[in-house]
Image (cartoon, coloured by chain):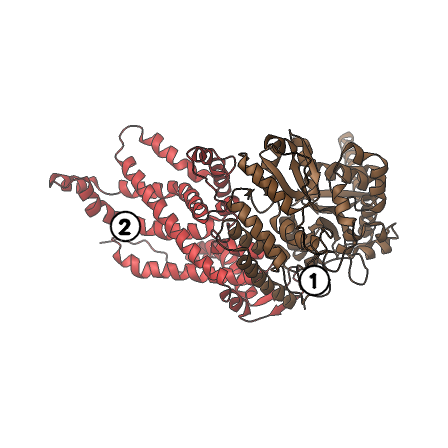
Chain colours: A brown, B red
Amino acid sequence: MNKIIRNLVGTIMALCLFTGTVAAATEIHWWHAFKGRLGTLLAEQVDQFNAAQSEYIVVQNRKGNYSETLNAGIAAFRAKKHPHILMVFEVGTATMMAAKGAIKPMYEVMSEAGAKFNPDGFIGPVKGYYTTTTGEMLSMPYNSSTPVLWVNRDAFKKAGLNPDMDLSTWQKVGVALDKLKSSGNKCPLTTAWQSWVHLENMSAYHNIAFATKENGFAGMDTELVFNGPVQIKHIQAMGNWAKEGKFIYAGRRNEGGKAFRAGECALYTESSAGYAGIKKNAKFDFEIRHLPYWEGVKGAPQNTIIGGSSLWVLSGHSSKEYKGVAAFLSFLSSTVIQAAWHQNTGYLPVTLVASQKTKESGFYDSNPGTDIAGIQMTRKSPTSVSKGLRLGSFDQIRGMIDEELESVWSGKKTAKSALDDAVKRGNVLLRRFESSNR
Amino acid sequence: MEKRVYFKGWFLPALLIVPQLAITAIFFFYPAGTAIWWSLFNPDPFGLSTKFVGFANFDFLFSDPYYKESFYTTAIFSVLVTFFSMGLALFLAVLADRLIKGAGIYQTLLIWPYAVAPAIAGILWLFLFDTRTGLISWYLGLLGYDWNHLLNHNEAMGLVVAVSTWSRVSYNFLFFLAGLQAIPSTIIEAAAIDGARFWKRFWTIVFPLLSPMTFFLVVMNVVYAFFDTFGIIHTITKGGPGQSTTILVYKVYSDGFVGLDLGSSAAQSVILLIIVGILTILQFKFVEKKVHY
């Protein structure tokens, strides 16, 4: 009997010791939106951090797509069960910036923890997106990409076109589309993220405003103005191509990728981050080109803007936990991690050193085209209308733009009336956002 | 004389209905009350500041032409779903009722679609109608018809109606079959002896006797089309193209959960609540009088 008790006590003590060691490491929770190849790479970063030290354990959880993740984070915040780090896509930036009591600005987290952090190490367009007008960096850039033109060289050859032909302007792309269509190609051009590529980036690339007040950077009283002549011209051209079967609409997100990767489409406008998937699945000769621009528009090509996400630290946790957050974030911004992330995914190298290191390693020589996105974003310094967008309720406004663009592709509306309607509807939401955050 | 069983005193009956009342209060009154409360505010997403705006959320909604269009879309959608799912179910039930051999298997197989969750049903139908890889859209392509519910409004509406109908037919079928089997065969035999043919018997005897069941199903199917079809629409069209399949409940979701506009979303749920309330009252007041029990 005594023996049994002794054994039992021993077991209990051992259990206490065991849980004691586990509890000693502080858990840092990170909610994100990545699955598939990107999810695996993200998990590897976390494992690497956890293995490198024993003080903190980062626990990563996928909460759905970008919108769902943001929504999960917000719902959790309301229930006071929120994670330390939340991945928020660039569209949600204005929403997060306005939520002053819910976030802990990154510069604050870093300085309080005394962690190594240099905001100037990030490339300008990326840094600018997440920094206030007074120069404080509020969130940590995680994955940033910019739209490029993906070319299926085999499809060009099949249509009797020279795959090396100049595709730098939409005028030239138009000629290629005619040829592709007349030679029987079923999908000459498709796109992902229509509003991001064909309105938001298209505006910045031609150095014209998407919204007033420096696209929202200079104040919440911003108004949408993307119904100008250049945007109308572009959307009308796309609408005509859709009617003629030269532009195939596949969906609001990146559904077009399936058809391109399967080799059905000749041209595809999509984020540079499509690289991971295209490289893995494409059984044809593909190439990355600069996003085309309209020849004759003054100032074009300017620079394109980013898409992707940044990591926001949420308020309401202990200072010990924030120390862990700081350690993890500075780990993520380290050159090794950044360079590997860029090379594996096609996202931009967000730090200057990571980009330098990638260049020196000879990666761009053995993977031609992977530097296009970086060049396209940084070859000119951004103007007041090409540094990005900061608009409230923007996910919802994008939804409205999607709806209006669909009515252009289906021929129900002209480009002008669709864009006018989108501007009108979006402005109502901007006013509403302004009033709820005043 | 009818024999009635009743409880003496009030304690036991009160005790017996408490669980039901508690469930109703917690899961129906409380959320509905919260929605009504929030519809008067314009909160920011994180709930950091909430501003009382009175009926401004409702003004905002009714000044939006797209919201009004959503009513129209919902009306068309629910009428089509109710009509087709009940019509088809009645047809199948009448056939099944006359079966002598293999009735069990036939009935069991017909019930299967009901076990498929709406979102799964949507995905299953996408295997058939996906614009690029769908089996049926491929065959349609061979026939020279370009199926594209991503851009064609009517095809999109047709597709979500078809899927919603398909996953509802089983439910209606079960109730109709039960209703048919409850009709005394003596009445029908008497009519047959008097020389009434099948269709005559159906319209003059069976259909009127089924009316309580039909009435019940109309109420249930309208409610189904209003609310339970969310998963189907979300997986197939996400409310598009344009807003051609954005029914009211889908707009509640996209404004509240994607747009994070909780005030407007709450106001929309209140409007939905009122609509369903009015529809139910109308049905009970006017249609029920014409129903034979």
Residue at image position (82%, 60%) is A135
**B135 w.r.t. B39: above or below:** above
| Left or right relative to B217: residue B153 | right
Q: Secondary structure at mark 2?
A: helix
Residue B59 location in percent, x, y?
52, 69
Q: Residue furthest left?
A: B194
In the rendered image, which residue does mark 1 sit on?
A216
**Residue A6 in which image quadrant:** top right
Front label number (1 vs 2): 1
| Left or right relative to B147: residue A429 | right
Say which chain tag 2 marks: B
Residue A378 location in percent, x, y?
78, 49
Residue A216 location in percent, x, y?
70, 62
In the rendered image, which residue does mark 2 sit on?
B211
Residue A342: assigned label: none
Q: Are marks 1 and 2 in contact (CB under 8 Å)?
A: no
Q: Nearer the viewer, residue A290 or B160?
A: A290
Residue A283 location in percent, x, y?
64, 29
Q: Nearer the viewer, residue A378 or A94?
A: A378
Residue at image position (55%, 46%) is A241
**A128 w.r.t. A365: above or below:** below
- Count of picture labels: 2
The local crowd at label 1, few if under 14, some if 14 to 19, many if 20 or more residues have their Cα within 10 Å, is: many
Badge 2 amino acid:
Ser
Q: Disc 1 versus disc 2: distance between alpha carbons? A: 60 Å
**Residue A103 in which image quadrant:** bottom right
Q: Quadrant of the C terminus of chain A?
A: bottom right
- Can residue A99 be seen by looking at this rendering? no
Badge 1 amino acid:
Gly
Q: Nearer the viewer, residue A147 or A316?
A: A147
Residue at image position (24%, 47%) is B207
